[in-house]
């Protein structure tokens, strides 16, 4: 623990009904897939996706999201959609959001799902370690990885289509596919165990220890990672259980984190930026899927090994919020910590949420309007060599600690082309200088390579394990 954390007390801080049937796979039904090259796909929060749907008629729209089967509009969503029908103008944003939230994501293209797609409301994230025979020798680890990733890839496809895998326990009978995505990752330790240490990408270099880290060894690292996102919590939890069962012979869970975001379908503005547990709009300046900026920020670049082409790197940090302290601040003081207004998310220099911050703007007494130690000033690409990352994190609330304080915060998940120049470079500054540091503490950390999508008929990681 950092020397100055004691002064701040024990909490920190460190420093400053009818089953819904998915339509058969068809080119049009795959439109829910957030392949970045698909112009219909928008920001990770779905903003552009919804706007682009505006020209579609109701039936055409439902067909695109995979809800019109041969017999017409499928079961349980019909009532909701009729209730909000907007006549000849096509579906409203909320209709579109509700339809998207129950439909199946049908991955296409070079990337795994769960990265460019709008984040669903519920998360189950698990890190696994190779165990038993799989940990006995490099050859056994290699073949265990192949077997496990083959079984997981197949099961994930079945689950995402809203079908019951053989090992699924029929837990989700009667539930829609719920925009389920399953994303697999590999830790550097898995490659070492499998005798592939020489193929560890330089981008997987360990995240350095930061002076104010308070990492719990029980919430660190892992040989494998699985990110499961779904709009329905039962669908997410059941998928996690299915993958646990399939892992049994070769791997066991090392740590698990549940998370949640607001349900877009329940929101006044389903396409707007969601809030985190501090109450801030979080995700405003994320790169938008489908843009060159996103592709550059997120997908592995030319410096990555060939087996990672189309892949990404994921940094996971469990960041506890010291909410009892945060909630004592006035709203104005909270805005200064971030550098954005709390209500609208607009930069303190003026404008609206998506106006560029003016970091040169000064108050009458000459001090910067967006404070020098504000989170946004320190993390903005302008002061970080233009580097960006896709922040796709989830709030978590894990009950109370021994003192009765809420163990709640942000499970920070950031996809990026190179964590050395993105997460690590930015966090080095935040850890030292960020005004937000007095209200958060990092308690978990992991880094994974997220391989590209499985080749047709193959498994995730095949480009590494079979070349
Ligand atoms: C609990 C911890 C954190 C909270 C509550 C938080 C909250 C926020 C908020 C409210 C914004 C402004 C709106 C937006 O653009 O999304 C923001 C921006 C940002 N944050 Fe964080 N953040 C946290 C941790 C981190 C960490 C650990 C990093 C990376 C090391 C990070 C990187 C960024 C970046 C790159 C931006 C965008 C800056 C810009 O382009 O304007 N944040 N964060």
Image (cartoon, helix red, strand yellow):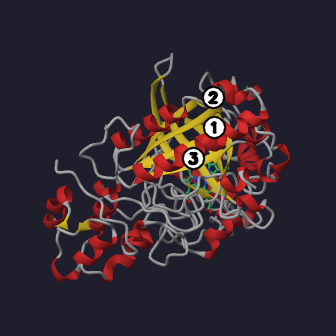
Q: Quick check: 75 above or below 404?
A: below
Helix or strand or loop: what does disc 2 sit on? Answer: loop
Helix or strand or loop: what does disc 3 sit on? Answer: helix
Q: Marks 2 and 3, Cα distance to the nearest angstrom? A: 43 Å
Left or right of 19, for residue 103: right
Q: Upstream in the sequence, badge 1 or badge 2? A: 2
Q: Residue at x 75, y 49 (%)?
A: 424
Give the residue at mark 3.
150
Residue 323 x/y as whole percent: 50, 35
- Which image quarter holds the N terminus? top right
Q: Upstream in the sequence, badge 2 or badge 3? A: 2
Q: Residue 438: which disc?
A: 1
Rate crowding at label 1 as few (under 14), some (14 to 19) or many (20 or more) other CA atoms within 10 Å. many
Q: Residue 310: which disc?
A: none
Residue 310 x/y as whole percent: 65, 64
**Count of numbered badges drawn on the protein:** 3
Contact check, label 3 and label 1, Cβ < 8 Å: no
Give the residue at mark 2.
12
User: Would you say residue 408 is visible in this rendering?
Assistant: no
Contact check, label 1 and label 2, Cβ < 8 Å: yes
Q: Upstream in the sequence, badge 3 or badge 1? A: 3
Dot in front, 2 or 3: 3
Dot in front, 3 or 1: 3
Residue 438 x/y as whole percent: 63, 37
Rate crowding at label 3 as few (under 14), some (14 to 19) or many (20 or more) other CA atoms within 10 Å. some
User: Would you say residue 15 is visible in this rendering?
Assistant: yes
Q: Quick check: 177 above or below 51?
A: above
Left or right of 417, for residue 264: left
Q: Quick check: 182 above or below 117?
A: above
- Residue at far right of view: 198
Q: Quick check: 371 above or below 190?
A: below
Q: Marks 3 and 1, Cα distance to the nearest angstrom? A: 44 Å
């Amino acid at each position: 623990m950092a020397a100055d954390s004691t002064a701040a007390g024990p909490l920190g801080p460190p420093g400053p009904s009818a089953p819904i049937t998915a339509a058969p796979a068809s080119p049009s039904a795959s439109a829910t897939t957030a392949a970045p090259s698909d112009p219909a796909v928008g920001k990770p929060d779905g903003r552009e996706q919804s706007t682009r749907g505006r020209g579609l008629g109701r039936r055409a729209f439902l067909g695109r999201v995979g809800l019109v089967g041969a017999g017409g509009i499928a079961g349980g969503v019909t009532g909701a959609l009729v209730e909000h029908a907007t006549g000849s103008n096509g579906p409203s944003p909320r209709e579109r959001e509700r339809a998207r939230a129950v439909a199946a994501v049908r991955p296409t293209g070079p990337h795994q799902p769960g990265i460019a797609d709008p984040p669903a409301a519920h998360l189950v994230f698990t890190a696994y370690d190779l165990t038993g025979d799989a940990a006995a020798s490099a050859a056994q680890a290699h073949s265990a990885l192949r077997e496990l990733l083959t079984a997981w890839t197949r099961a994930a496809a079945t689950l995402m289509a809203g079908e019951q895998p053989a090992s699924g326990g029929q837990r989700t009978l009667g539930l829609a596919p719920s925009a389920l995505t399953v994303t697999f990752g590999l830790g550097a330790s898995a490659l070492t165990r499998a005798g592939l240490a020489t193929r560890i990408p330089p981008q997987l270099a360990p995240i350095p220890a930061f002076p104010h880290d308070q990492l719990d060894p029980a919430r660190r690292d892992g040989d494998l990672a699985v990110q499961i996102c779904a709009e329905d919590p039962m669908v997410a939890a059941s998928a996690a259980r299915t993958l646990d069962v399939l892992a049994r012979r070769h791997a066991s869970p090392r740590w698990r984190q549940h998370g949640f975001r607001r349900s877009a379908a329940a929101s006044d503005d389903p396409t707007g930026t969601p809030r985190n547990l501090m109450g801030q709009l979080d995700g405003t300046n994320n790169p938008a899927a489908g843009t060159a900026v996103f592709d550059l920020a997120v997908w592995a670049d030319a410096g990555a090994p060939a087996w990672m082409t189309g892949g990404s790197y994921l940094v996971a940090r469990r960041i506890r919020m010291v909410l009892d302290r945060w909630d004592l601040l006035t709203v104005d003081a909270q805005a200064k910590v971030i550098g954005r207004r709390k209500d609208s998310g607009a930069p303190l220099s003026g404008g609206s949420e998506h106006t560029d911050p003016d970091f040169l703007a000064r108050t009458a007494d000459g001090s910067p309007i967006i404070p020098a130690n504000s989170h946004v000033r320190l993390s903005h690409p302008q002061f970080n060599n233009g580097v960006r990352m896709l922040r796709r994190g989830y709030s978590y609330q894990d009950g109370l600690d021994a003192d009765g304080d809420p163990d709640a915060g942000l499970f920070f998940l950031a996809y990026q082309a190179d964590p050395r120049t993105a997460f690590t470079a930015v966090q080095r500054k935040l850890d030292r200088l960020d005004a937000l540091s007095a209200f958060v503490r990092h308690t978990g950390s992991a880094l994974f390579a997220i391989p590209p999508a499985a080749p047709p008929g193959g498994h995730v990681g095949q480009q590494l394990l079979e070349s």
